[in-house]
Amino acid sequence: MATAPITLVDNSWVRPLSQTLTIYFKEAKYEFLTRLRLRAYSISTITFPLMFYVLFGLVLNQKDAPVGGVGIATYLIPSYGTFGVMGASLFGTASGLAAERGLGWLQVKRASPMPPFAYFMAKVALGMTFSCVVATLLLLLGVTFGGVHLSVLGATKLVAILVAGSLPFCAMGLAIGYFVGPNSAVATINLIYLPLSFCSGLWVPIMFLPKFMQQIAHFLPPYHLAQLALSVVGAGQHESNWIHWEALIGFSLICLGVARLGFHRDEGKTYG
Amino acid sequence: MIAVVEETQELRKQGSGNGGAVIASLRRASKNYGAVQALRQVDFTIRAGELVALLGPNGAGKTTAVKLFLGLAKPTTGTVGVFGGNPIYAEVRTRIGAMLQVAKVPETLRVREHIDLFSSYYPRPLPIDEILTLAGLQEIKDREFGELSGGQRQRVLFALALCGDPDILFLDEPTVGLDVESRRVLWEEIRRLVARGKTVLLTTHYLEEADALADRVVVINRGEIIAEGTPAEIKASTAGRRIRCVTSLDIETVRGLPGVIEVRRDRAGLEIRAGSAEPILRELLIRDAGISNIEVTSAGLEEAFLALTGTNNDAT
């Protein structure tokens, strides 16, 4: 009865690096294609910040009213840039993860030999890619129609900061994605995303907010990313950039910790 | 084509007999989800080259058993082994194909894109054209998943299970919700796999499906294996007979006869289900001289299954 298994698995098997890289690449490529074709994501994450910018930065722009030492068209690029990055990152990670986790698709992938990390990296890469697109388009709009002057170096630095700044929000998205259901994901993200944006001074510049709200803003991660981005164009609250970086890194680590908790909770429930 | 496949199946059955080596097993495996005992002390082996059907009603523990084999769940007690290893490891998973029940698949990816991605996970994937042909997807390979019919969607999931050229496939209710035509197409594809020497475990609550496909049927109910054998043996073990007759005896009297499992009113007469027909017929003929229209049929796998699970349910 207890016949020995015919073929044992070779325990020393390690996937060659080139194959691993191919998996990471394809995972990211198809994640990108999936979302690009999903108009609800690709159109809304890109057009909302651009629309706001066109409306408040270009159309309703009063040329003689500088904000934080620079023109409003300049000030609003880092500001709506941060807003756009948050949207692209949160929706790019959380809604997909929540749906795929809740509706069984993640389990199909987990049953395959896919390296789990490739799956998460693909979501992060997606968030960063869309963040880069939003930031670049905002900049192009500003330079072309808003009379914004920025050196090539400055422009590159601004986009780079915004793209790097998508990481904390991708981490936040993964954490959210592990704790919301597939149907409530979008509503939950909006419930966090919109108030957070407003309170961090992304819609109305921070100095126009009441004093107590300015105090609260210091505890909100988008505020710190916006300040980093604003410092590139010479605006903002002129605090030490180190504070902002530290705040963002700390926030990322907390979110990754929460996401990890969610991952293990899931493994415990479905795989435990 | 069908004839050829059946011939190969026949050969394989003769050849394998009892001899195929065990390639996957559950040993005294239990799985609890909180207070719910999904599996209780299950011993279950799968041998190379066979097609085993795990048959049971909803909630019997079929999916849980599959999840244990796939390393998606850890047994609360007992062990699981696939190819002598633990299926949580990627090196074991490269030899396993899985088709699970999934509520939603990313809809904006095309069929061949889904297959391309899954193929990249495996060290020696089948060529994409071969996968498309095996799963009957050639004509719809450029369609997005969201545009496909239910049967086509199941075939894509089937293709994903195939693409690593696995030695063993776990198909969890592969034909659930499909129309008769799509179901038969998928059956044919599953038969073709086994003809290629693959080992398959499929779960189903369609008795007809187990009967049509499996070499061996394992009946599971409430987390326990309650019967095991070839489809013919399962039927024989319950020796179910169905007797139809028109009689003046009232239903309660008939129900009280020894050996009667179930009695239903059937149009003008009664339909009696019993272990064996003869003692009941004798009683009926003695008690009712006017009995007419007697018809005895052997119970199908369906009746056998109901008898098995029904008896078990009464016992607990």
Image: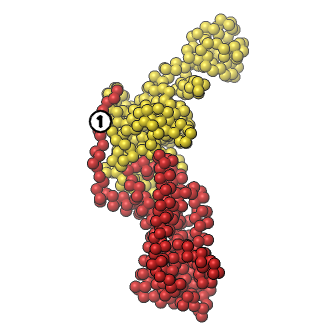
Chain colours: A red, B yellow
Q: Residue B191 vs residue B205: left or right? A: left
Identify which residue, B212 or A4, lies in the foreground: A4
Q: Position of residue B163 (x, y in %)?
A: 37, 48
Question: Which chain letter goes with mark 1?
Answer: A
Query: Would residue B18 be found to the left or right of residue A123 on screen?
Result: left
> Relative to B206, is A17 above or below?
below
Q: Can you see residue A37?
A: no
Residue B297: % across, % down: 56, 19
Q: Nearer the viewer, residue B107 or A3?
A: A3
Q: Position of residue B21 (x, y in %)?
A: 32, 32
Residue designated by label 1:
A6
Which amino acid type is shown beneath numbered disc 1? Ile
How packed mark 1 is, by other alpha carbons closer than 10 Å (few <14, some 14-19, many 20 or more), is some
Residue at position x 57%, y 60% in the image: A185
Q: Residue furthest bottom?
A: A64
When the figure is inspected, residue A32 is found, relative to residue B177, above or below; the finding is below
Residue located at (29% from left, 59% from top): A17
Q: Quadrant of the C terminus of chain B?
A: top right
* Quadrant in which residue B257 is drawn: top right
- Secondary element at image label 1: loop
Is A232 rendered above or below residue B60? below
Kindly identify the residue that appears in the image at 53 percent across and 51 percent down.
A103
Could you say where residue B200 lies in the image, as x and y percent from the top left?
40, 37
Q: Is residue A152 left or right of residue A259?
A: left
Instruction: Report if residue A9 is visible in the image.
Output: yes
User: Where is A157 relative to A174, above or below?
Assistant: below
Looking at the rendering, in which quadrant would you find the N terminus of chain B? top left
Residue drawn at 49 percent across, 73 percent down: A247
